[in-house]
Image: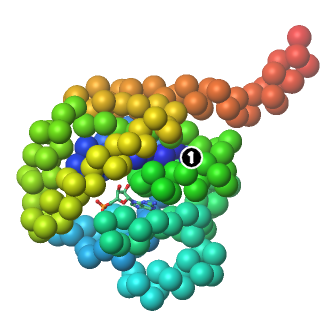
Amino acid sequence: MLVLSSPSGAGKTTLSRMLLEAEAELEMSVSVTTRPMRPGEVDGKDYIFKDKQEFATMRDNGELLEWAEVFGNCYGTPKAAVSEALVGGCDILFDIDWQGTQQLRESMSKDIVSVFLLPPSAKALSERLKTRAQDPPDVVADRMSKASDELSHWAEYDYIIVNHELAESLQELRGVLAAERLKRRTGLAEFVRQLQADL
Ligand code: 5GP
């Protein structure tokens, strides 16, 4: 379970897309949210869009692995899709905030690898939020003012990547994934047993 967090506008969504394209055995966890759909977003692909009542029902029925309120809207990770992917032997990428990461760390600590993406500068963050032009100006201002709070959680993460350049950040993120896969030694016990049997 590879968790990627960052302040809004640091390039996390773009980097996630690039990583998913580069890594065949990695699936994205599609979150449920009550926030309004942005132009260009697709329901069921970028998010599963629900109203507040539907979200509350999912949460109260225990259908969410974690959930949090971010910028006045609710976001959560549906349990079922994650279990299915894990059983199928796939790794999963989560684009969630620090609150969700803390919850996953408590419930599934051994399976979590967490990465925090830092923007190269405050100016770059503000420019990205403005040029994204998908949110109204008051939403952009709110996200800028909360960036400092989000940044304060950087040290809780296993790895920190400073997003100077997307291609370089992608390489670093793939390096993390490769090393963590090797560390988990998946399937190796049987392989070594067979090697010994063949000696
Ligand atoms: P946005 O509205 O820009 O898509 O996302 C706002 C923030 O909510 C981002 O920091 C994103 O990582 C976080 N987020 C998205 N989905 C989830 C989720 O399922 N759980 C939690 N805890 N945070 C989420």
Residue at x-position 41% and y-position 72%: 74
Q: Is residue 6 above or below residue 120?
A: below
Camera-side residue of 189 and 148: 148
In x, y percent, where is residue 70?
Answer: 37, 64
Residue type pointed to by label 1 = Met
Name the foreground residue: 62 vs 186.
Answer: 62
Ligand 1 resides in the quarter of the picture at: bottom left
In this view, the residue farthest toward the bottom is: 53
Is 121 placed left or right of 32 in the picture?
A: left
* Quadrant (top left, top right, bottom left, bottom right) of the C terminus: top right
Residue 73 found in image quarter: bottom left
Q: Residue at x 60, y 81 (%)?
A: 60
User: Which type of secondary structure does the marked residue at label 1 adopt?
Assistant: loop
Residue 74, above or below 102:
below
Q: What residue would you read off at disc 1?
A: 1
Numbered disc total: 1
Q: Position of residue 162 (x, y in %)?
A: 30, 30
The image shows residue 188 at horizontal and vertical percentages of: 75, 28
Tell me if 34 is positioned left or right of 178 in this view: left
Q: Residue furthest right?
A: 197
